[in-house]
Amino acid sequence: MSQNHPLHQTELAQIQSQTRRHFLGWGAGGLGAFFLNSAMAAPAGENAALDFTRNPATPLSVLPPQFAPKVKRVIYLHMGGAPSQLELFDYKPTLARFHGHDCPESFIKGKRLAFIQGIPKLLGPMFPFHRAGKSGTWISDRLPHLEKAIDDLCVIKSMKTDQFNHAPAQLLVHTGDARTGHASLGSWVTYGLGSENQNLPGFIVLISNGGTTANAGKPLWGSGFLPSVYQGVACRSAGEPVLYLDNPKSVSRTQRRQVLDAVDEINRQTYKDFGNPETVTRIAQYEMAFRMQLEASDAMDIRREPQAVLERYGAEPGKTSYANNCLVARRLAERGVRYIQLYHWGWDSHGTPVDQGLNVGLVGRCRETDQPTAALLADLKARGLLEDTLVVWGGEFGRTPMWENRGGQEMEFIGRDHHPNCFTLWLAGGGIKRGISYGETDDMGYEIARNPVELRDLHATMLYLLGFDYRRLNYPYQGLDQKLTGVKPARIVSEILA
Amino acid sequence: MTGSSISGRHSGHLSAAAYFGCVALLTLAGVGLAMLARPAFGHDMLQWIGLESVPQAQAASFYALRVAPLFETRCAACHGEKRQKSDLRLDSFANLLRGGKHGAVIRPGDVKNSELAARISLPASDDRAMPPSGKTPLTEDEKTVIKLWIAHGASGSLHDIAGAPKPVIEVEIPKLDPAAVEKQRAPLAVQVHRLQDQFPGVIAYEAQDSADLEINASLKGGAFGDTDMQALAPLAARIVRADLSGTAVTDASAPVLAAMVKLKSLRLSGTRTGDMTVHALEQTKALRSLAVVDTAVTAGALAPFRARGVTVYGDGDGP
């Protein structure tokens, strides 16, 4: 846990350790909890923080949301690098007409662009578009599998951000702030709701295409100022799912148990001496890791799936792939994991190296992700899980309607620059309208023309679906009741709610 | 001449009445000039001394509900109480109609000649665009609302304008009243607590503002069966969701399930339940979702549920 304001930190720690000692003394969830609930009732107020007091020995225990939720879990499919909305969902025939023309001066005058210099040319959509499904939602020919699920999607074409570099933009998407140090969405959700499965982390991160790192690094799933137990755990879909979880070769499970018992003994003595609740959390973490040795390997093991299922996803056991991660995501959802975060990297289609061309790289990313994403949606739907799961797909910003000309030069491969003004993101699942498009960009795909959605609006809407008023899911830190949505007013996007 | 000597004596001085008369005249002239130069000030004066009525909009009018909030949130920071750029205030119906330094900004019924309509329609890059570059621009819908309102006479009483974009609906967060919830929960509170201890992680309140319960035994797998369901029977009437996927529950639990009169969602996938269980649910009117993938339930038993709009998962062709 990061450092609070000193005075505040001391007070908070004192109160928490006292209350937690009470908890232990009275027995978890027993009359003690009852007494505390009434004794510690927060001062009345519309935006007062809700009571998230837990027995520190079970920091992930389930707490009911503020009001009846529409969804119980989230699967967030982040396409790292920012996929081009203009090649996938946001069809711009006018832009196509002006393909190859110099871009209007107003697009660049006084604007800060990441790489474009001089006067770039306009770049029309690279792939043909058509209307799909009963809803007639526009989609390009790059996503033929997802197209089958199009009537389950709510496509928001008017997302906006104020960050045009990957790392801060990704942080803004996942922590509500462009700087590091804030709690991630998954951490907030597991802090608020806990997790149903006490043998698995409540917040699991799965990464494909690009090793284990992200532009913004691990702060993307960090817990920031929230207790560290709520941070995301990055798991691997090949090899041991969690590094260093397995016992070393010569150590048996019994021996591991004995070691843990000994450590436990010492920790308990430490807690008795100093009363620091983080000690109890640590004991709980060791215990969870021990239980995870069995449960995590089972949850991650897609070899247990029938061949037909593997084929639907395009999953190949033993590999690290987005397809495998989608299948694992479904298995984790079934096992009560609260927040499942996938990252698939490589969507940064500048047109600099060949794999970053819209004509090559983006085509490849679509091929890697289209079938598994569609299979995941279909699978969740068939099992009845989609009705209480929220699936989110999107990048960290959009891409320019202008043809990138890095250094003012024409480039070998075709690409677009970073574009924070507008991008497309889709949602599917419980509480979300199905088969709709929300928001519009202008004819050139440069600015939002109708119904802008800020990331904080998306966050507020997601928390609402999970049963929270975003104002009341807060945490005191540095003299401020910290919220996922930050200090600016957010809006629950009522128009997309079913 | 005495008279002239008198007038001479008084030539450098005015009588008190004449003096005050002069001051009043000059003041009036000054005020008059100010009123000519700044019509807004003139209207202020006239309204202040009661010679002109202050235009008021009706509380439930299109103006009050749709237009005023836009001016308030997007314009009033610079054209309001604290700052009055170009002497223009847009923070009340009267101020809006009054205009600013350069005269009226709204000509009722005449969008084309309304400066305000023109300014909000300029591209963001234009120096004269409002709100100015860097501030959140008005959306197309918001511009349409303002222009339609001007076109329809900038009325303070008109309620509806045909063709106006739909009003934005804000989500209302249910009020949380812990005392009321505690009261609702009280009759079963002790039993709920006892059973929560007996079945850790299986029973939870649906929400902090609710006395309704959810059960999720799916993570217990085969370790949760009919006897356990029997133990939960006292809570049945409060249970709104039940996930029994993959548990050892069989048709023997049908009566307990039937007693869950508020049940909205039931998951039985991967259990050895069959048609008997499903038949027992026919009177559960609240049921909206039923998952029976990999069970012995047949398509025939599911038909009535599908007919009444329950979402059914699983096709009823057996495990």
Image (cartoon, coloured by chain):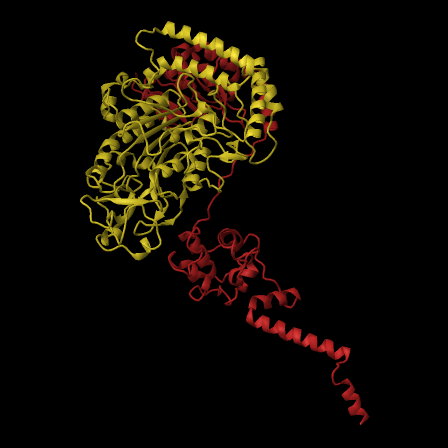
Percent position of residue B148, x then y: 44, 58
Residue at image location 44% in from the left, 49% down from the top = B166
Residue B162: tell me if it is visible: no
Q: Tell me, what hue is chain A?
A: yellow
Residue at the far right: name it: B2
Snapshot quadrant of residue B94 = bottom right
Chain appearing in red on the rendered image: B
Residue B154: tell me if it is visible: yes
Residue at image location 38% in from the left, 5% down from the top = A255
Is A5 placed left or right of A233 in the picture? right
Residue at the far left: name it: A412
On the rendered image, what quadrant is the C terminus of chain B found in? Answer: top left
Q: Nearer the viewer, residue A262 or A432?
A: A262
Is B173 placed left or right of A443 in the picture? right
Snapshot quadrant of residue A383 = top left
Percent position of residue B318, x then y: 30, 17
Is B298 placed left or right of A28 in the picture? left
Snapshot quadrant of residue B27 = bottom right
